[in-house]
Image: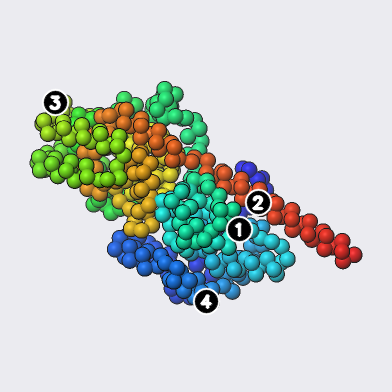
Amino acid sequence: RHYPGTTYDLMDVWTDIDSCWPYYTIKDTYKSYSATPWKWRTLYHVSNNALYAKFVDYHSYYMNEEKIRQKMETYDPDVVVSVHPTMNYVPLFAIRKISQKLNKDIPFFTVVTDFGSGHCTWFNKDVDKMYLASEPIRKIAQNRGGVPDEKIFMTGLPIRYDFACQADAMGDRTSERGKEYQRQMRERLEIDPNKRMVLVMGGGEGVGSLSDIVNELYAKFRMQGVNATICVVCGRNEKLKKDLETRCWDTVVSQSLNSYESLRSRFFTKLLQHASRSRRIQMALDRAAAKAAKGKDVADTPGNVTVVPMGFVTNMAEYMVAADVLVSKAGPGTIAEAAAVGLPVMVTSHLPGQEAGNVDIVLNGGFGDFCEDPESIGLEVACWLQDPQLLDVMSQKAMKVGHPHAAEEIVLDIGRTTHQWIERNLSRNAETNTASE
């Protein structure tokens, strides 16, 4: 769009070459470990140090550099952009050798796609430029990677273009224009515009966890008289989608009522001790706790609640615009997308190590909270939906964190820099040809 005629190729370093063990197993290992938190935690913390990183760098260089270089050379690139932590050492060495062979300078850039924390293998000080999403990531890059200021470009996390379009069209979610745009979006998506809307995404969570969260959201909304639509993104999980479509919601409410009395004190006692929650959210929960203590937390008229199970969603930006709250795991992309459109977030889980910093982005940013217990999630989100001023404050704080045009800014800068390098190569070659004549 910005550089017509430009082409790009995607190369997965560890699957596009005939690599040796353990490198050819990285893709399958990622799937297995990310679904098993204790395995992921162990691998992440054992490997996240300079000694381990150096060992892997040298071993992968010795075993795979020649193959990687041969594959990269077939593309005849003008620029190389790394978007994965394991692809910043050997590919950089390979492209430097290719540059010498072809007698042209080829820039190597790293776009760090983690938000609040990052593995040490992301940060190679020898790259030509590094694009970072947040201040915590910048500190890691400088303190652990030794990346100099002049190589760092602060942009925000790159997200899909749809979110930039929707953010521009909606503007401030809390303004009259923003609220009217949200209403129109709900009508377009056939969601009741007169009810609150909560968007639930499971990511890598198991069926049981996501299912329990939906149950508790439904039950607490009903009991507290909150009229809401709960849109559940099931992705390719057809089993969960069909289960939600046929679930007896009266039974769900009955089971939640049976456990509500014992839950009440446990929820507010445990939840209100979280030191990192914003003061504004804390005040709202204090009021809810006082209301519960007086026995006024069950409405006379049950809420009108509808659950809408959805499969794989391609227009996620539209659904985030239509939502009042997002309930999701702490994926960096998901949080960045929500912040881009000013959407408050309830974080329900995170991968140990890698995604822990993303929770801090939400908490320190003041646009959400973190809770793993489904019943507590239901109670707190119900509290938010009954406090329009709180939702507006959280939305405004989210917009301060969001960078809807980050991907565009990165592309424009990469394009400008690459063209400068190309012109420099052409000028140098022209001088060489003139001198040889």
Q: CA distance from mark 3 to mark 1?
A: 64 Å
Left or right: 172, with 246 as reference point? right
- Nearer-N-terminus badge (2/1): 1
- Nearer-N-terminus badge (3/1): 1
Give the residue at mark 2: 417
Labelled pair 4, 2 in contact (Cβ < 8 Å): no
Left or right: 383, with 391 as reference point? left
Q: CA distance from mark 4 to mark 2?
A: 32 Å
Type of amino acid at the residue the image marks with label 1: Asp
182 w.r.t. 214: above or below: above
- Nearer-N-terminus badge (4/1): 4
Left or right: 364, with 87 as reference point? left
Quarter holding residue 91: bottom right
Labelled pair 4, 3 in contact (Cβ < 8 Å): no
| Disc 1 secondary structure class | loop
- Nearer-N-terminus badge (4/3): 4
Nearer mark to the viewer, of 3 and 1: 1
- Residue visible at 43% across and 60% down? 119
| Disc 3 secondary structure class | loop
Q: Residues within 10 Å of mark 1 (few under 14, many from 20)?
A: some
Type of amino acid at the residue the image marks with label 3: Asp
- Residue visible at 15% across and 38% down? 253
| Disc 4 secondary structure class | helix
Type of amino acid at the residue the image marks with label 2: Thr
Q: Which mark is residue 300?
A: 3
Q: Residues within 10 Å of mark 4 (few under 14, many from 20)?
A: some
- Residue 286: horizontal and vertical position, in percent? 21, 35
- Residue 335: horizontal and vertical position, in percent? 40, 45
Give the residue at mark 1: 128
- Residue visible at 27% across and 29% down? 387
Q: CA distance from mark 2 to mark 1?
A: 10 Å
